[in-house]
Amino acid sequence: MSRDIKQALNALVDHPPSGRRTLDPAPDATPIPAQLGVGKPGAGGGGSSGGIASPLTEQGYTSRDYYAPKTYYSTDGLFSFQAKPIKALKFNDATGAPVQFNFAQPPA
Amino acid sequence: MTDYVEFPGPTEPFDELAAWGNCWHGRLFNDGSGAQLTTPNDVVLDGTDGIVFNYAAGCSDTHYVRNPKAPAVAPEPSADLAAAGGSWYPDAVLFSASKRYHPKQGDAIGQHSWLYIDSAGTRWIMSVTYGAPQTITFGGPPYFATCTPSFSVWCAGVFGDFSGSAPPAQPRLLGTFAVEIEWDNAEQGHQWQTGWWAGPVEMAPDGAKAAVGGWMQHDDFSGGATWLIRVAEISLAGTGSGADGLGITATVALSAWRQTLLSSVSESNVDGDGYGTATTTTDVVPYLVGWSYSKAGALNVWERRNYRHTTYSATGAINYPTQTWSQTNTWETKAEIRANGSVRSEAHSAKTYTRDFVRDLSTGQYVSDVEDTQESGTFGAYFDDPSIGESWRLSNAVYALRWGTVLLARASADAADGDHLDTFNSGGWTAAWDPRTNTVETVLGANNALAFV
């Protein structure tokens, strides 16, 4: 019997709904043991092309760099105070590699 | 002071300061029942909200301040702040005689003081003190009085610096300036008694220009009257340093107090009796009676013109049994005071005094003495929407006007004798300049306090 005739006969017969086959449950994933991330050193060995491993830990409060003090005026111009805009923050990542944030200088 | 200033506190690296300073502005008024602040969006705050203002503390003085370092445009208030009546402006108004900053507290920079903003944006507290009253020297005719008082300019440190600037141990003296003032038609022992420098200063928005007035006192009216007769302009320059503004210098330029004295006299003996007929016309033009600075910093000059026309004639019979005099004095005072912007003031007045009398020369007694005084014209001052007042003391009207600011003479006529002077001191009026709208409001009634902030 050809495949076409068999399909045609089946089409003429009312079949009760048949359960569709489902996939078997996926097996539990094998747990990955806890470990530290490892950044791959770049080809040049400078680390510039590598990732940053969290967390970042500031090297120390005194390591911050600031721009020259900027005067902030009250809206009416009668009061003022000075603050030093942040220029750079220096961190070490989880591997101990240095990471630095450089901030733009705010307009005068 | 910081209790009343919306101060942002320490800033974080990524914070942007939105607005801080004084957010309470509007019309500050007290008619004796309590201070009220009507904000630009018509929220009324009163003593329960902390508003403080009264007549005794002085009112009406206005020092408009614009710091070029301040933001050019003030942000819109938040919805909550606006609902409470708050608003932000990129400038400030120091109000009342003591130059207060905030309507909810009384701290002020002090009487006869103002703020000079140097090129670094620092606000330096400047002040003027006046020398002791001076002895007046009389001369003439034509009669005049003169004296030479002095004033001093001081720097009292920085205003409003939260970075920890310490006040100076004592104010620094920038200079003492002696200025001659003089007034004509001043007869010794009759009118002019003393003179001094007094009165607050009129300041440009950056404080680099300030005007002080030279005054003399007139004792012809009850309580005395002061007349502004010369103006000195203080110019400040330089960037201050240290606690007392080292580097700031002051120079003084003087107004021409009397530019021209025109006088013509004609006399003739028409009847051979030895008594002549004289006509004297004296025009003094013009008097510089006030300077002020507009919101934009432009100098406004107020001038006053005085005219005095005197006609004197005397006739008598050949045998001199009697002598007939007729004396007519006509005074005209015209002032036209135009400030830049919308503030304007004008005043006109004329008074004719005629006296006819006959004296018996054999006894020396007057047998007839008829006096007639007529007044004409409008004397007073008004602004944009004229609210014409009456006052004989034009000088005082100008005195008031010259702050940029205004105490506008407005006294009711005295029904009893028509002497306006009687009602002047008890008249009660005040007016103030609103630099936000560049308009002037006048309020009648004693002990009203009015200012704009």
Image: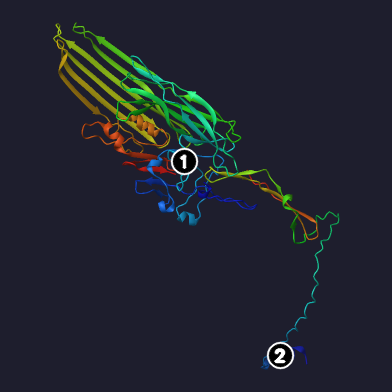
In terms of secondary structure, where does tag 1 sit? strand
| Residue nearest the viewer, comparing A94 with B416 | B416
Q: Are marks 2 and 1 on the same chain?
A: no
User: At 21% from the left edge and 31% from the top edge, which residue is drawn?
Assistant: B417
Q: Is residue B124 above or below residue A93?
A: above
Judge the density around disc 2: few (<14), some (14-19), many (≥20) Cα neighbours within 10 Å. Answer: few
What's the CA distance linking mark 2 and mark 1?
Answer: 99 Å
Q: Nearer the viewer, residue B286 or B253?
A: B253
The C terminus of chain A sits in image quarter: top right
Amino acid carrying label 1: it is Leu
Q: Is residue B46 among what the camera can see? A: no
Identified at 71% across, 92% down, the residue is A9
In the image, farthest residue toward the front: B169
| Relative height, residue B74 to residue B155 (above, below) | below
Q: Which residue is mark 2?
A: A8
Q: Position of residue B19 (x, y in %)?
A: 54, 50
Q: From the viewer's perspective, is A96 left or right of B48?
A: right
> Which chain is home to disc 1?
B
| Above/below status of B179 relative to B339 | above
State the image quarter where residue B379 is shown: top left
Residue at 32% of width from left, 26% of height from top?
B219
Q: Position of residue A45 (x, y in %)?
A: 86, 55
Q: Position of residue B240 (x, y in %)?
A: 59, 34
Where does the image place residue B340, in percent across and percent down from the top left? 43, 34
Q: A55 or B154: nearer the eye?
A: B154
Q: Which of the 4 image quadrants contains residue B257?
A: top left
**Tag on residue B94?**
1
Amino acid at dot 2: Ala
